[in-house]
Amino acid sequence: MSDSPLAELVQRLPELRLLTEPGDLEHYGRDWTRRWTPTPLAIALPSSVDEVQAIVCWANELNVALVPSGGRTGLSGGAVAANGELVLSLERMNRVLDFNAVDRTLTVQPGITLQAVHDAARGNGLLYPVDFAARGSCSIGGNIATNAGGIRVIRYGNTREWIAALKVVTGNGELLELNRGLIKNSSGYDFRQLMIGSEGTLGVVVEATLKLTDPPPLSQVMLLALPDMDALMQVFALFRSRLSLQAFEFFTDHALHHVLAHGAQRAIDGDYPYYVVTEFDAVDEKTQEIALATFEQAVEKGWVSDGVLAQSDAQAAALWRLREGITESLAPHRPYKNDVSVKVSAVPAFLHEMQALLTHEYPQIEVVWFGHIGDGNLHINVLRPDDLDEVAFVAQCDHVTRLLATTLQSHGGSISAEHGIGLVKRAYLESTRSAAEIMLMKGVRKVFDPNGILNPGKLFMDN
């Protein structure tokens, strides 16, 4: 290590935990994409803001690239260290720092898991409403870096709606305190919002103050079986007009097959092409009657073929598992993933074009898709056949993604709804952002990270 840049880092921060074993390098150097071979220089695990600042200053002086790292549950290669970067893991900075009952905020370190945030909020009688299946392993810092959404965006919005304040270490080691928890603050540019969704390319989040809200009212969960794709939006429109929806999630028969094979229990007999899990407020008998009447109307119109209304918390959890268990059930297949979005009003037309494109381009390949239909976000998972070489498979998928990006562009959509751009989607950024926007984004990055040490190669094709 004496001839390595690490020697200087160790000298400056003798108490810093630093990992260099091959197993650690592999573990911390990749995310869920598994498409790149991790080759980090080392893994730094700071325990304080001061250590993060010192690491960034060291990296600037020695021109060492840094990859900020949280739970590494990302699906776009945003946390991959494949070119000798130092991985800056925030997992040791995982504490709740403060709860403010008057402001109804929770201040946390970036390495805390989403589940731990949920538990802390619930322990104080409140709710942090951003939620998704990876809650037990993803970190708040990573959620902020990608503006994570999840299953309740239809009611609560994305992560950015729930960030009251941030502390961020910029690419030159400066510590910024952004917004300071203010509700009203019209004193110039809101750098807090700029950091959210920036994928660690502008700064390293070292502290976040999260907004909390009241726990949701009593709710009920319903699983619906639908006869065709057109029924998805018809059912959504009907249920949204009659009920106060907390979530409205759909998946296909292919997705159900994988989840059932992974251990979930079938809830509806028979096979149907599309399914919806919806959760809605049901505070009294009247709203429950409205829910049943809405279901019956959907059946009469031919939009719903069958359904199940959960009769207990355990049954509700079992119905939710059919949707939330999809990603885990597909993980062994190492799918090529697309995460796209369009305006809700554009969903029907886009679905038909997308389905036609996927059917034509993947005639012998299984495609599993599901998503948050209520906010226009679709997740497409392409499963590699055993007899198709990995390189050829990725090349084919990249070709189809280029076609998909063009289709999205015609509908005013985005190639990344909630997973970020990272390495996977940077070639398609121009389908979502204009050349002028990309130029300005690169200029902003240069201001916050003058030497380009923060997550280089991510977001843009060149730096």
Image (cartoon, rainbow, N blue to C red):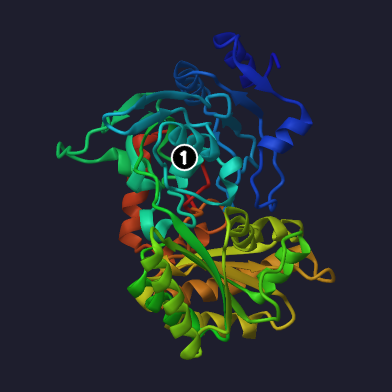
Q: In percent of the image, x 31 and y 28: which residue is there?
A: 101
On screen, residue 261 versus residue 203, left or right, reads right
Crowd rating for badge 1 (residues with CA inside 10 Å; few <14, some 14–19, many 20+): many
| In the rendered image, the vertical position of residue 217 relative to residue 55, given as above or below | below
**Rendering coords of residue 35 (x, y %):** 69, 53
The quarter holding residue 432 reads bottom left
Q: Position of residue 157 (x, y in %)?
A: 37, 54
Name, please, the residue furthest toward the right: 387
Residue type, mark 1 in image: Gly
Q: In this view, does 27 lie to the left or right of 182?
A: right
Q: Can residue 146 be seen in this view?
A: yes
Q: Where is residue 150 in the image (x, y as percent from the top left)?
A: 49, 55
Image height check: is 382 above or below 437?
below
Q: Based on the displayed image, in which of its 4 quarters is residue 363 positioned?
A: bottom right
Apparent side of residue 455 relative to residue 272 in the rendered image (left or right): left
**Which residue position is annotated with label 1?**
200
